[in-house]
């Protein structure tokens, strides 16, 4: 049913993402799209850090790369990452949105348009409100949306904002998010 | 985030209207990007609907100039990706620019100017300014006018300075620019002797004999068809052995492209045109 999973996070999300990538099997059949805020001048190191415990390859895509199953695509630093209707990555250096580039809202809303009901969107721990609008777009397009339980989040601003903006399908802790991802594969 | 959303049909209607009225063909721009720019304009200029945008574009030539300016994405900052600029400074430019022959550099879309300003500063620091011939073009007359005057967005000064310091540790960026009433200006000396010209959307007028092209993060806004067409243009205007610099997350990857270009600066997007 699901053709893509898209995850957004900021402060406090790194540990959750590594747990998720560590739990997914090598041939996980759904592409993972990741948009995580980070320092823009730290170009290298982040993919490597995420890859250490991941069973699926983690890549920073080039513009126009095709989206394939069994791969995690991390939005490159200082670029927005759109999902085109032809299921390819499109990068952009347009102005920041809510002080963010990459903007989670832009990745989520373009993925919603492309995958519609076949998209799973997840918002994790974070210190700003980016992603709340995008998560609503996923829900409005018929997709499924999950927010990390604010009680478990290191910083709950992002998940609280998402909960305020959208009537979510599930509020889950990390282990429940992993169980859900393993169940839908 | 824009309050207004356009459907694919609306977007295509706008493209068609522009093409019929002005003979500017944007149909091979990347669709998601183009749609988002249009939505941004609907909000910024209080137009609200595709119908209004088409009406104002086709009835008001001055607004069409504004439209062209908005379609040219601003360069994000000066010295974006400092590692590239360090690579250029640490021997790359000095080994290529010979004092006996002219070294031609082209910026096909100079946009908001930060890439050009960064290079002019670097050439000045390397004492190479007088040995290069710089060509800079844009599809937007308004963008060109701003860049000729060395204008930049002062709100980016903090990030510009941070990047500058990563390359020139003991210098200050304000040796090269000033801020007046929230607007940044490069010093007039820096912008002397640059050949500016307006470009059509398909870049059918291009300079010949170019030895270095700065074309970073521009292919992002094209679809595959346009990207390949433009790369052929770039290949035609470069001399054999000349270089082209593209964005860190762009690549040259068309059928048989390895016969035309070879990647020489893997982490910095620097390609070289092969000798045939």
Image (tube, coloured by chain):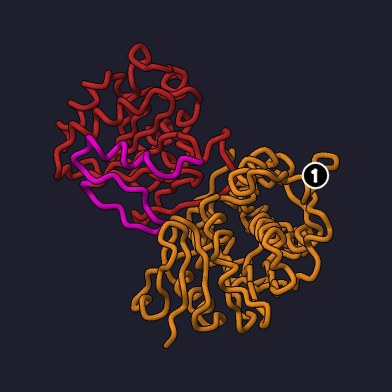
Chain colours: A red, B orange
Q: Residue sitting at 64 percent across and 58 percent down?
A: B115
Q: Residue A104: x, y in percent?
A: 45, 36
Label 1, residues with CA under 10 Å away: few <14, some 14-19, many ≥20: few
Question: From what the image shows, is residue B46 above or below residue B220?
Answer: above
In front: B161, or A179? B161
Judge whether residue A158 is colored magenta.
Answer: no
User: Which one is nearer the viewer's eye here, B95 or A103?
Assistant: B95
From the viewer's side, name the closer residue of B84 and B4: B84
| Disc 1 element | strand
- In this picture, which residue range is highlighted in magenta? A41-70
Left-right relation of A66 to B145: left
Quadrant housing the N terminus of chain B:
top right
Q: Is residue B181 left or right of residue A108?
A: right
Residue at horizontal 45 percent and vertical 73 percent from the top = B228
The outermost residue toward the bottom is B276
Please, which residue is most extreme toward the top here?
A: A151
Asked whether A42 falls inside the magenta stretch, the response is: yes
Residue B60 seen in the figure: no
Image location (x, y in percent) of residue B246: 50, 63
Residue A160, compared with residue B55, is above or below; it is above
């Amino acid at each position: 049913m699901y053709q893509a999973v898209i995850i957004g996070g900021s402060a406090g999300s790194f540990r959750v993402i590594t747990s998720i990538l560590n739990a997914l099997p090598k041939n996980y059949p759904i592409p993972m799209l990741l948009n995580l805020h980070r320092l823009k001048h730290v170009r290298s190191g982040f993919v490597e850090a995420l890859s250490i415990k991941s069973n699926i390859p983690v890549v920073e895509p080039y513009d126009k790369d095709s989206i394939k199953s069994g791969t995690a695509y991390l939005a490159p630093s200082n670029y927005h990452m759109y999902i085109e209707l032809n299921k390819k990555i499109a990068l952009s250096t347009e102005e920041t949105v809510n002080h963010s580039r990459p903007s989670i809202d832009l990745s989520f809303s373009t993925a919603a348009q492309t995958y519609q009901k076949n998209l799973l969107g997840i918002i994790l721990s974070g210190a700003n409100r980016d992603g709340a609008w995008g998560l609503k777009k996923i829900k409005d397009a018929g997709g499924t949306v999950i927010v990390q339980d604010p009680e478990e989040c290191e910083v709950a601003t992002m998940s609280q904002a998402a909960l305020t903006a959208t009537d979510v399908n599930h509020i889950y802790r990390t282990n429940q998010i992993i169980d859900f991802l393993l169940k839908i594969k | 985030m824009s309050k207004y959303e356009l459907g694919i049909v609306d977007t295509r209607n706008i493209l068609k209207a522009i093409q019929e009225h002005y003979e500017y063909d944007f149909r091979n721009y990347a669709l998601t990007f183009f749609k988002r720019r249009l939505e941004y304009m609907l909000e910024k200029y209080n137009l609200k609907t595709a119908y209004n945008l088409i009406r104002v574009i086709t009835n008001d030539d001055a607004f069409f100039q504004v439209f062209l300016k908005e379609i040219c994405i601003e360069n994000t900052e000066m010295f974006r990706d400092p590692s590239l600029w360090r690579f250029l400074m640490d021997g790359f430019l000095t080994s290529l620019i010979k004092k006996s022959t002219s070294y031609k550099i082209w910026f096909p879309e100079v946009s908001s100017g930060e890439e050009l300003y960064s290079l002019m500063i670097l050439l000045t620091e390397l004492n190479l300014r007088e040995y290069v011939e710089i060509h800079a073009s844009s599809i937007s007359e308004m963008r060109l006018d701003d860049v000729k005057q060395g204008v930049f967005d002062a709100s980016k000064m903090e990030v510009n300075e941070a990047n500058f310091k990563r390359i020139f540790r003991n210098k200050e960026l304000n040796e090269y620019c000033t801020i007046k009433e929230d607007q940044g200006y490069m010093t007039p000396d820096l912008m002397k002797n640059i050949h500016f010209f307006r470009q059509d959307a398909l870049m059918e007028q291009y300079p010949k004999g170019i030895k270095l092209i700065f074309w970073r993060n521009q292919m992002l806004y094209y679809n595959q068809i346009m990207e390949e067409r433009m790369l052929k243009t770039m290949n035609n205007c470069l001399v054999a052995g000349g270089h082209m610099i593209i964005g860190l997350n762009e690549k040259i990857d068309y059928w048989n492209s390895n016969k035309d270009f070879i990647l020489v600066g893997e982490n910095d997007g620097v390609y070289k045109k092969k000798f045939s």
